[in-house]
Structure formats: structure tokens, C-alpha cells
Image (tube, rainbow, N blue to C red):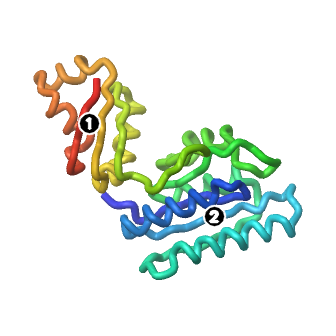
Amino acid sequence: MALKDLLVCVDQTENSVVRLRLAVDLAIRNDSRLTAIFVRELNRAEASMEAVAERSRSTLEALTRGHNLVAEMQCVDGVASVVVPQHARYADLCILGQDRPEGPSSVDYTFAEQLLFVTGRPVLFVPPVGSLETLGRHIVVAWNSSRPAARSVNDALPLIEQAERTTVLMFNPSATIDRHGGCRESALSRISGGTGPRLTRSY
């Protein structure tokens, strides 16, 4: 499995630059095509939005310079809650922020959560706090044998395959392990798709 097309949502928040940097790094490591989308909300001053869009475009160009990476910046007029899901449906992974709203056009928690239910595609949230150098090198799987857990693991397999380490956190592990003949290693391998160079467990 491969992440051929990545979509990263950028906006006027400070964390937008972090998302761009992380998305570029992930695209380089997976040989993916990267699209950065900036939505010009109709209720914002045009000059202000154009300045933010140009700043995002310059940042993307600087981050991708010197790399054999196909990347583009798309500036689209509309409402983010409508435009971003439409574009996300054509991507293998959508990278989104969780910034608290700073204005009418900020992407807030309600919008971020909405994408989980309306796109039908995997969504990766970048938290607004903390210092992240990269994405996907250490994957943590929260497993409780539920349908959402199975779907999440399946969507994350491209990342798990490339991860340096995968940790599976099992809730009520006896129910899962008993179905695999009491073999913990077999259960863990099935949960993670048998991928990843290093697999650890926590109960």
C-alpha cells in the first residue's frame, strides 16, 4: 500500500507552517504527490486572504526546493467546511490542524471532527501544541476489537508499513487474544497487518 496523494489544509494560523513542513517530509519519504489547499473564505478581506495565500505558497516552495517532489498550492474561493471535504475525497490522506479559532475563517475543532464523517478518507490531525519533527515514524494503535478500530488500522496501514516502530495498546486484550489461540504475537500481527519492522505491545 502507498500514499500516492497527500492533501494538507493550510490557513492563516501559525501552526499552518508546521503542517506544511510535516506534510512535505511525509511526502518525500513516501514519494507522494502533495497538494496544499488554502480556502479563501468569502467573509474575509480579500487583501488579507491573498497575503496569507502567498505566504503559504512561498513556504511550500521553500520546503520543497531541492527535492524531487511533485507539489502544488491550490487557492480556492468558498467555505472551508464545503471545499476541503470535496478535495479530501480524492486524497489518500488529508493532513489537518486542530487550531482553536482566531477568526471567522479559522479551521476549528468542529470542522476537523466533521471531516472524519463526511470525507470517507483517512484524516490525520496535527495538534496545536508540542514540537513535532516528523510524522509516522512511531505509530501507536489503540485497539479494542471494535469496527472503528479495525477501520482506523486499515486506513493507517500505509503509515504502519513505513514506520520505524509500531506500538499496539490493547483494551480488554484477553478477548482478542483468545480468538487467536492465546497467541499474543499472532493477535498483534493481525491487528497491524503483519507490517512494520518493529512491533511492541502494551496492555
- Is 194 placed above or below 46 here? above
User: 10 Å neighbourhood of mark 2: few (<14), some, or many (≥20)?
Assistant: many
Residue 125 percent location from the top left of the image: 54, 46
Q: Do the CB atoms of the residues marked 2 and 1 lie less than 8 Å apart?
A: no
Kind of residue sitting beneath label 2: Ile
Q: Is residue 145 left or right of residue 182?
A: right
- Is 71 placed above or below 151 here? below
The residue singled out by tag 2 in the image is 37
Corner quadrant of residue 30: bottom left
Q: Earlier along the polypeptide chain: callout 2 or callout 1? A: 2
Residue 43 percent location from the top left of the image: 86, 55
**Measuring 39% from the left and 52% from the top, which residue is drawn there?**
136
Kind of residue sitting beneath label 1: Ile
Q: Is residue 33 left or right of residue 53?
A: left
**Measuring 76% from the left and 59% from the top, which residue is drawn there?**
78
Q: Using the image as rendered, state which of residue 116 and residue 129 is in the foreground.
A: 129
The residue singled out by tag 1 in the image is 191
What separation in Å lies between label 2 and label 1 (alpha carbons)? 33 Å
**Measuring 26% from the left and 41% from the top, which residue is drawn there?**
192
Kind of element beneath mark 1:
helix
User: 10 Å neighbourhood of mark 1: few (<14), some, or many (≥20)?
Assistant: many
**Measuring 72% from the left and 73% from the top, which residue is drawn there?**
54
